[in-house]
Image (tube, rainbow, N blue to C red):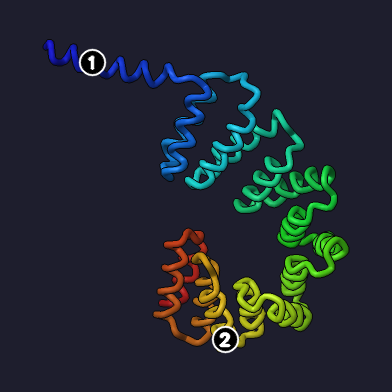
C-alpha cells in the first residue's frame, strides 16, 4: 500500500511539473522536439504553450506553427483550424494566407483556396508564387481565362519565368491545346532539362493522345529526375502500362502510389482495371 501511495505521489509531482511549465518554456520544448523530428510531442508542447497563456500576442504565430506540424502529421482538419485561428488575429498575413490556401487546394477545397489567394494578391498584387498557385486553382475551377491572366501577369513581371510557362502548359493541356502545351514543354526542357514536371506534363499529353510508349519514356524520366517520390508520377506510369496491357506492372505502380499517400479510392478504381 505504501508503495502505491509513493508511486502516486511521484506521478502527481511529475504531472504538476509538466503543467507548471511557462509559455516560453513550452515553446522551447516544442523547438527541441521539432529538431528531433518528434512531431507528435511538438504538437502537444505547442498546445500546452497556448493553454498556458491564451491571450499572449505571440499565439497567432504559435497557431500557425501548430497548423504546419498538424499538416505534416496528416491532420488536415486540425491544421486548417489552427491556420484559421492564426488568421483571426492577422487576417492579411501573407504566410498565414498562403499556407491555408495551399492546404485547402491540397484537400480539393478550391473555392476557399481561391478566396485566400485573392486576399493575398489584393495585398501583394505582384506576388508571383500566389499568382501561380491561384492560376492552378482557377484551372481546377475551370476559370480558364482567369488562369491564363494569372500566368500572363507572371510573364509581365518576369519574362523568363519558368513557372508561368509551366502553368500555361498545364492550362493548354486541360483545354486540349496539346500541340501548344507540348511546344512549351520542349522550350522548358532547353532551360531546365532535369526538371521532372516537364516530363510528367509531357507524359500526360502523350497519354491523352494514346501514345503509351512515348508517355512511358517521359514519365520514367520524371521519376528518375525527381528528388522525392511523387505518387502521381507512378499513377501516370500505371496508366501508360495499362494502355500497353502490362497489367501486373501497372498494379505494382498503383500500389506504390498508394504507399506514398495517393488517394486510396481513386487507386482502387485503377486497380480494378488491372484484373
Q: Nearer the viewer, residue 166 or 265?
A: 166
- Residue picked out by circle 1: 8
Looking at the image, which residue sits at the far right?
A: 156
- Residue 184's x, y, as percent? 75, 78
Real-space CA distance between mark 2 and mark 1, rounded to the nearest whole angstrom:
68 Å
Q: Secondary structure beneath disc 2?
A: helix
Residue 47 in the image: above or below residue 209 = above
The answer to whether 246 appears left or right of 209 in the picture is left
Q: Is residue 118 left or right of residue 75?
A: right
Asked where in the image residue 205 lies, by quadrant, the reply is bottom right
- Depth check, front residue: 49 or 212: 49
Which residue lies at the image location 70% right of the left edge and 48% below the top edge? 113
Q: Residue 58, percent across and down?
A: 63, 27
Closer to the eye: label 2 or 1: 1
| Discs 2, 1 touching: Cβ within 8 Å | no
Identify the disc placed on residue 212.
2
Crowding at mark 2 (Cα within 10 Å: few <14, some 14-19, many 20+): many
Disc number at residue 247?
none
Q: Is residue 92 above or below residue 196?
A: above
Q: Which is more N-terminal, label 1 or label 2?
A: 1
Residue positioned 70% across, 30% down in the render: 88
Q: Is residue 141 visible?
A: no
Residue 175 in the image: state x and y as whole percent. Answer: 77, 72
Q: Residue furthest left?
A: 1
Residue drawn at x 52%, y 24% is: 24
Amino acid at each position: 500500500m505504501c508503495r502505491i501511495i509513493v508511486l502516486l505521489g511521484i506521478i502527481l509531482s511529475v504531472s504538476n511539473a509538466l503543467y507548471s511549465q511557462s509559455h516560453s518554456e513550452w515553446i522551447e520544448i516544442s523547438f527541441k522536439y521539432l529538431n528531433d523530428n518528434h512531431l507528435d510531442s511538438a504538437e502537444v508542447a505547442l498546445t500546452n504553450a497556448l493553454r498556458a497563456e491564451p491571450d499572449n500576442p505571440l499565439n497567432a504565430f504559435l497557431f500557425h506553427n501548430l497548423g504546419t506540424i498538424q499538416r505534416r502529421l496528416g491532420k488536415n482538419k486540425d491544421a486548417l483550424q489552427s491556420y484559421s485561428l492564426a488568421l483571426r488575429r492577422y487576417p492579411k498575413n501573407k504566410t498565414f494566407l498562403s499556407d491555408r490556401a495551399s492546404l485547402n487546394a491540397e484537400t480539393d477545397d478550391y473555392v476557399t483556396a481561391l478566396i485566400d489567394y485573392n486576399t493575398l494578391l489584393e495585398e501583394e498584387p505582384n506576388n508571383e508564387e500566389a499568382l501561380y498557385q491561384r492560376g492552378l486553382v482557377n484551372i481546377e475551377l475551370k476559370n480558364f481565362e482567369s488562369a491564363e491572366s494569372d500566368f500572363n501577369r507572371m510573364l509581365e513581371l518576369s519574362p523568363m519565368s519558368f513557372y508561368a510557362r509551366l502553368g500555361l502548359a498545364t492550362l493548354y493541356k486541360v483545354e486540349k491545346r496539346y500541340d501548344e502545351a507540348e511546344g512549351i514543354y520542349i522550350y522548358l526542357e532547353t532551360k531546365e532539362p532535369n526538371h521532372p514536371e516537364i516530363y510528367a506534363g509531357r507524359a500526360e499529353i502523350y497519354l491523352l493522345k494514346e501514345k503509351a510508349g512515348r508517355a512511358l519514356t517521359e514519365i520514367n524520366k520524371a521519376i528518375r529526375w525527381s528528388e522525392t517520390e511523387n505518387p502521381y508520377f507512378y499513377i501516370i506510369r500505371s496508366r501508360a502500362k495499362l494502355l500497353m496491357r502490362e497489367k501486373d506492372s501497372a498494379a505494382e505502380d498503383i500500389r506504390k502510389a498508394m504507399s506514398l499517400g495517393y488517394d486510396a479510392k481513386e487507386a482502387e478504381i485503377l486497380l480494378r482495371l488491372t484484373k
